[in-house]
């Protein structure tokens, strides 16, 4: 799995951080998503998929490999 984010689409809701703080964080400057791990381990895959699905701005893309 590979993950990418579009900070321009992010509405700073922070839901992704709440689901998988090991993979996502929020910028202190503008609250937009920060990707901490573009290739998270398998243990985080379900959470990353959930975060992408609940993201109100659809800013998270999951690339299954």
Image (tube, rainbow, N blue to C red):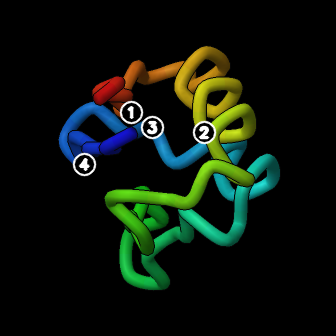
Q: Residues within 10 Å of mark 2 (few under 14, many from 20)?
A: many
Residue pointed to by mark 2? 48
Quadrant of res 5: top left
N-terminal of the two: label 2 or label 4? 4
Which residue is found at the position 37% from the left and 28% from the top? 62
48 up-or-down from 54: above or below: below
Nearer-N-terminus badge (1/3)? 3
Disc 2 is placed on an element classified as: helix
In depth, the one of 26 and 22 nearer the eye is 22
Numbered disc in front, either 4 or 3: 4
- Quarter of the figure with residue 64: top left
Residue on which disc 1 sits: 60
Q: Position of residue 43 (x, y in %)?
A: 73, 53
Please state which of the two labelled residues, at mark 2 or mark 4, is closer to the viewer: 2
Q: Residue at x 48, y 84 (%)?
A: 28
Instruction: Looking at the image, tell me whether mark 2 or mark 3 is earlier in sequence order.
Output: 3
Rounded to the nearest angstrom, the CA distance separating label 4 from label 1 is 9 Å
């Amino acid at each position: 799995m590979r993950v990418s984010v579009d900070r321009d689409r992010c509405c700073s809701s922070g839901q992704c951080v709440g689901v998988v703080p090991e993979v996502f964080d929020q910028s202190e400057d503008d609250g937009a998503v920060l990707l901490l791990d573009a290739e998270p381990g398998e243990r985080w895959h379900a959470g990353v998929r959930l975060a992408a699905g609940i993201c109100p701005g659809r800013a998270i893309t999951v690339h299954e490999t």
